[in-house]
Amino acid sequence: MCKLQAVVLAGGSGTRLWPMSRQQLPKQFLKLAGEESLLAATISRLSPMVTQDDVWVVTNEAHAMGEAFSELDHLRTILEPCGRDTAPAIALAAALLQEDGADPVMLVLPADHLIQDIPAFHQGLKHAIQAAEQGHLVTFGIVPEHPDTGFGYIQAEGSEIAWSSVQRFTEKPDLNTAKTFLKEGNYFWNSGMFVWKTSVILAEIKKYQPEMYQALQVMKKAWLAGEPWQEVVRHQFQNMPSISIDYAVLEPTDNVVMVPVSMGWSDVGSWDAVFDIAEKDVDNNALSGHVIAIDCKNSLLRSESRLIAAVGLENIIAVETPDAILLCPKDESQRVREVVAALKDTKGIELEEHTTVKRPWGSYTVLENAEGYKMKRIVVEPGASLSLQKHQHRSEHWIVVSGTATVTRGDKVFTVAKNESTYISIGEKHRLANQGKIPLQMIEVQVGEYLGEDDIERFEDNYGRG
């Protein structure tokens, strides 16, 4: 049996789960169902068939250096400098897995799906591995529970055997078409999960996507010549065409088989999907956080920071975060993407990040943001430090609330204890570190004409940020 390696695709944006999912911390890094993030749960369910050492996570470079650092820093990662859809990500991962002449079976999984029946998933995976070892491209088809316009569909020859040939793929249909599919039978939801040998998928990419294959060979030649492969990817991945694996290979080829599975699957793609998988009270409400619900039915009410007091609501979604509130009928939750589009047009900060932003060294929370000044609460974990940096447009006042700060300011290094403060002038090199045993908490007041997070010139950084 060929060795099995998993590639988890974790570069999505999760726009339909705003306001919890943001550009800097999308849904795959959030805890939407249980105590693990969707990414962590995806990796956990692979055990014991795949060990963590045989899992690669493909994600955006900015995620690994930003809010998702704590989710990713212990994993093997392939960092994309820019998004190019699933086909280039899969092609790159397949080439890297062939190091030293290996030809493993490659399991490709989205990072943001939920599977509740793990034994059924493992059984389907065993069938998929068998088909892949015979040279097939294998996809998983989810046995549909109802007509749904949010999924693509796969038509297969049958569902009574371990796997069967795929006849066609259909993009997200309208409701009448989805109903027709279920009535006809042998139609399945497209899960976006695949299994194949690396040699087989690369041969198909060479056949159907020669431009992509050639760009991959250029990168491969560079890293085989001794250049660090991640640096090669950083500089050349942008030359890959942007296309999904479905359009690139699976639709034109005649070598795809499907393994049918029924395993409690959800793509957790919208708030109504979150409602479906959540625990309910006696009135079929999914309640989370500080919520009082009186005479409410069939609603999702989720609070992150403040009290939601609801009276007489039915079939409503209400999601509260410290800086935004989403309200919509349950059957309109797909339209959250329209809110995201509006925020893009207005350049709303609520699109990009939360009020509390995670960083490799800890976190910061924006307490107030007004013209000419910004106030933050900064938490630095024990043993961590910010980069050595300076700002061109702002000065900073630091007040330590708890713990002890080790401050570099110009040529001086000194400590600032609880209830003490210091000042960083515009253009002055500085660094903040916590050499203590407890978290350092401080209040920072920025003053200046421009207070954007990109006004940082780094000179040294423990986390590889430029």
Image (cartoon, grey):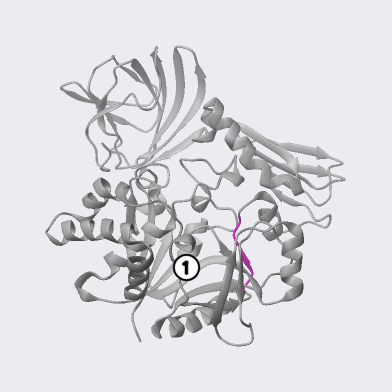
User: Where is residue 449 shown, x and y percent of the image?
Assistant: 39, 12
Which residue occupies the foreground of this view, 88 or 381? 88
Which residue occupies the foreground of this view, 258 or 267? 258
Q: Residue at x 43, y 78 (%)?
A: 49
Which residue occupies the foreground of this view, 407 or 163? 163
Q: Identify the secondary structure beneath mark 1.
A: loop
Q: Residue furthest left?
A: 225
Q: Residue at x 46, y 57 (%)?
A: 244
Q: Residue at x 49, y 35 (%)?
A: 352
Which residue occupies the foreground of this view, 406 or 302? 302
Name the dominant secondary structure of the magenta segment: loop
Query: Can residue 115 be seen in the rendering of this structure?
Result: no
User: Where is residue 367 shown, x and y percent of the image?
Assistant: 51, 25
According to the picture, the residue beneath numbered tag 1 turns out to be 252
Q: As shown in the figure, which amino acid type bears the numbered disc 1? A: Pro
Q: Quadrant of residue 3?
A: bottom left
Q: Residue at x 24, y 41 (%)?
A: 462
Question: With respect to residue 63, does 97 lie above or below?
Answer: below
Graded by Cα atoms within 10 Å as few (under 14), some (14 to 19) or many (20 or more), the crowding at tag 1 reads: few
**Stretch in magenta:** 263-268
Question: With respect to residue 408, does 150 lie above or below?
Answer: below
